[in-house]
Each structure stands twice: as C-alpha cells, then as structure tokens.
Image (cartoon, rainbow, N blue to C red):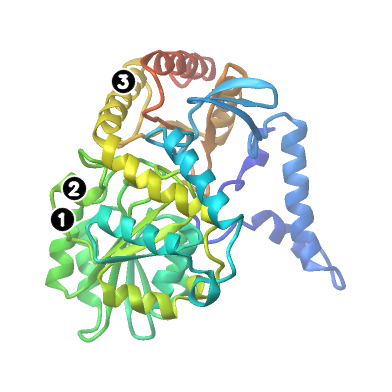
C-alpha cells in the first residue's frame, strides 16, 4: 500500500523522478499526448495515497501556539519546521513587517534594477552584509533562485564547478544550468575533492560548492580542509548557510564562526526563510562580486523585489539575532542534545547529525510511512524522507528541533517517536 509514496520528495535529486510516467509512455502508443501520461501518472499516485490516508504533505496550518500548531482541527507539536530559533512569531519581527506594509504598501513597483528598489531593500542588504562580516550582499526572491542564479552566472564555458554529492537540489540545478564542467565529489570527502581539483585544467575557473549543514543528515561541512584545498588549487569556495545561520557558532553567525575562520568563504550564501522568518536568499561577499551579480544574474535582474513587509521583517530578524542569538542558541543546543540523546538511548540510529536536523533512520519506505502515521495520529507533526531524496534503503523520518521547544515538548515527542518505533519494529 505505502509503496506508492516513492518519489514524492526530491529535495536533493537533480530532477523529479519519472519512472512511472516513462513506463506509461512506453505503452502509450502513437498519437497520445506524453504530457497527459506524465500528469495522469502522478495524479493516480497521489490520489491512491490520499485514499489510503497516508498522505501528509501540504497540511494547512490554521493556528500557531509556539511550537504547537493546529492543522485540520488537530493540535500537533511541530517537528518539521525550519524556524530553528523560534522567531516565526517574534513580536518585534511581526511589528516590523506591519510597519513596513503601512509605510510602503503591499508590493513594489517591479524588478529591483528598475523601479522596484526601496530604501528598505538597500538597508536589508547592508544589514545582512554587516551580520555575516562582508562588504555587501544581494537578496534574491528565494533560496532556490539564489543558488540557481549565482552558480549559473559565475560559472561559464571552460570553468569547473565541483559540488558535494549531498548538496541541496538548488545547488545541483545551478550546476546543471551553468555552462561549465560539472563534477561531483563524494560527500565531505576532501581527498576526492582534491582529486577532482587536480584534474581541472590549469587556467580554468574553479568553484567548489557545499552546504554548511547538510539538509538530509545534519552533518557539518569540513570547512578548514576545503579552504586549504581551494587556496592550493586557486579555486573559489561557495558555501550554502541555509541550515547553519542562527545554528552554528556561539552567536549563530554560521560555519565561519563555528570553526573560528572569519572571512574564509568567497561566496557566502544563506536563506531568509528558516532561522530568519521571511522569504528569499542572499549572497554576501566583496562589492565587486555583488555588483557583478546585480547586473548579470538573471534570477535577480528579472525577478520582482521582495514585498516591503518581508524586507522589514528580515531587517528586524537580524537585529533580534544580534540581541538574543546567544541565549536562543544555547537553548537550541540543549534541546538538540536532549532529543538526540533520548533517541539514541532508546536504540534509534540518528546517523551522523550534530545539529537540529535529526534523521531517524528506519530503512524502508513502508516503515517510514507507518511511523509517520503513528506520530501524526498521536500529536507530532513530522514527515518522512524517501528515495530519491535519499538513497534506497535510507528512508527516515526527519525531525527538526528548535529553541521554541520546551524540555516537556521534547519529552512528549520522544515518547511518541519511541512508541512509533516499537510498533514498527525499528527498536525493541
């Protein structure tokens, strides 16, 4: 029954899976519309899962109460969130969003390069640059577009782009769109990265790209070794801080603070929809590079500006991080240790994570869906991660811990996960 869920998630896959659609096409015969076969195949798959009551995607959240949500009339503890420091309903940030909307209206006059730039946008970018210790920053309309547009703009014909095999789909797609040579090195394997760098032509531009915290397993990029290799082989380093901003480092300033290596990343990317409760993504770096991207990155030049309310919220969120980041990061660290320790003590395999992204490894899709159903039915909002987002046999529930969770919340979640694991036979 639950085998039909395969392929519904493809967060790290370079393209959506189409095996079922291709099977249908092979028997379609002449004269049939291939788009219809593809669409119908997905429609049949999704409706079957919904009929089996195993479909937990796109649940509409109706109310927020700290880390608790109400969805479809049921109160659940949210463990599928990216708001790592619990800022999503921070009163200062909400007030800043309202004030910006009152002053500037609901939208802007278009794209940034023409009539869409507000003084608020310039202030937002300088606030980000100051926080991450760079000269300047550029903000795109989404994190996905940030990686897609930046990589495909920087990497041209004759250049090499080298990507960690566990990088996010937005990085993979940016590498595919770029006109250079696209190489993937084994996950966090600096020896393999060096082998790839050694193969690149002497005069080629080289860009190494990696997540700071990898979104499926929660482990941390080996920044010190990567920086040394990039210096040795004259390569630039781009790091995606989507899951490390607000999480790594005593002040939440990310992977450079975590390793005490300020200024070591050439192209510093981050999202504005996780720890920062807005939407968008940014690239921070020296003024020359940012100026180049402002005029040549198609995902920026041809996209409308962020709405004033979002820009206002982002600015205030960084100020809140400056004021409260240390305290909230300490709470987050405590919660992560509490949760991972409780899972491991019960016998769960949590992989290599040391961050708020906690994979509960279960192996098969069937078990992942069975445990998801138990958790959802017993008050914990969590979702499975299935192939092709992860390798076959590596299905898991991905639980995200936040600073908004209380110790009592963590204990409640542990009780539910442990009961689900016992029922599914994952733990004794």
Q: CA distance from mark 3 to mark 2?
A: 23 Å
Q: Which mark is residue 300?
A: none
Q: Position of residue 141 (x, y in %)?
A: 51, 61
Which badge, 3 or 1, is on the more N-terminal residue? 1
Disc 2, disc 1: CB below 8 Å?
A: yes
Image point 65% across, 20% down: which residue? Answer: 74
Q: Is 291 placed above or below 168 here?
A: below
**Secondary structure category for the residue under label 1:** loop
How far separated are the C-alphas under marks 2 and 1? 6 Å
Residue drawn at the location 39% of the way across and 75% of the way down? 293
Residue 124 or residue 361, whichever sits in front:
124
Residue sticking out furthest to the right? 31
Q: Which callout, 3 or 2, points to the residue nearer the camera?
A: 2
Q: x%, y% of residue 227? A: 17, 62
Quadrant where the image shows the C terminus: top left
Residue at mark 1: 262
In the displayed structure, would residue 135 be above or below residue 281? below
Label 2: which secondary element: helix
Dot 3 or dot 2: first in sequence order is 2
Whether residue 31 is visible, yes or no, is yes
In the rendered image, residue 332, in percent from the top left (x then y), is placed at 31, 29
> Residue placed at 38% from the left, 82% from the top?
156
Query: Which mark is in front, 3 or 1?
Result: 1
Query: Quick one: 264 or 195, which is closer to the camera?
Result: 264
Taking depth in this image into account, of 129 and 312 the one nearest to the observer is 312
Q: Which residue is mark 2?
A: 257
Above/below status of 84 relative to 245: above
């Amino acid at each position: 029954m639950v085998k039909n869920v395969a392929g519904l998630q493809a967060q790290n896959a370079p393209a959506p899976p189409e095996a079922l659609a291709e099977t249908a096409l092979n028997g379609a015969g002449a004269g049939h519309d291939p788009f219809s076969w593809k669409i119908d195949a997905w429609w049949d798959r999704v409706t079957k899962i919904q009929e089996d009551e195993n479909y937990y995607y796109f649940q509409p959240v109706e109310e927020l109460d700290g880390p608790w949500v109400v969805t479809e009339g049921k109160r659940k503890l949210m463990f599928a969130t990216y708001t790592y420091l619990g800022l999503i309903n921070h009163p200062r940030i909400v007030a800043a969003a309202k004030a910006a909307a009152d002053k500037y209206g609901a939208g802007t006059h278009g794209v940034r390069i023409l009539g869409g730039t507000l003084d608020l946008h310039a202030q937002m970018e300088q606030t980000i640059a100051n926080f991450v210790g760079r000269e300047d920053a550029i903000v795109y309309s989404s994190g996905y577009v940030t990686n897609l547009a930046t990589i495909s703009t920087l990497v041209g014909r004759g250049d090499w782009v080298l990507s960690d095999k566990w990088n996010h789909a937005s990085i993979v797609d940016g590498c595919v769109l770029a006109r250079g040579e696209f190489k993937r090195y084994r996950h966090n394997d600096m020896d393999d990265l060096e082998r790839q760098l050694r193969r690149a032509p002497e005069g080629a531009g080289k860009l190494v790209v990696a997540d700071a915290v990898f979104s499926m397993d929660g482990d941390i990029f080996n920044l010190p070794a990567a920086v040394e290799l990039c210096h040795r082989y004259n390569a630039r380093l781009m790091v995606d801080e989507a899951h490390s901003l607000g999480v790594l480092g005593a002040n939440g300033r990310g992977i450079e603070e975590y390793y005490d290596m300020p200024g070591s990343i050439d192209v510093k990317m981050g999202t504005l929809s996780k720890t920062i409760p807005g939407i968008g993504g940014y690239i921070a770096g020296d003024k020359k590079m940012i100026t180049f991207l402002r005029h040549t990155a198609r995902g920026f030049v041809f996209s409308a500006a962020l709405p004033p309310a979002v820009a206002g919220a982002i600015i205030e969120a960084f100020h809140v991080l400056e004021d409260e980041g240390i305290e909230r990061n300490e709470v987050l660290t405590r919660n992560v240790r509490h949760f991972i320790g409780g899972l491991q003590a019960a016998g769960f395999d949590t992989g290599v994570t040391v961050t708020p992204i906690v994979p509960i490894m279960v192996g098969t899709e069937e078990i992942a869906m069975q445990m998801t159903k138990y958790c959802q039915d017993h008050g914990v909002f969590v979702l499975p991660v299935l192939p092709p987002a992860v390798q076959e046999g590596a299905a898991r529930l991905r639980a995200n811990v936040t600073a908004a969770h209380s110790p009592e919340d963590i204990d409640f979640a542990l009780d539910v996960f442990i009961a689900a694991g016992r029922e599914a036979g994952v733990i004794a």
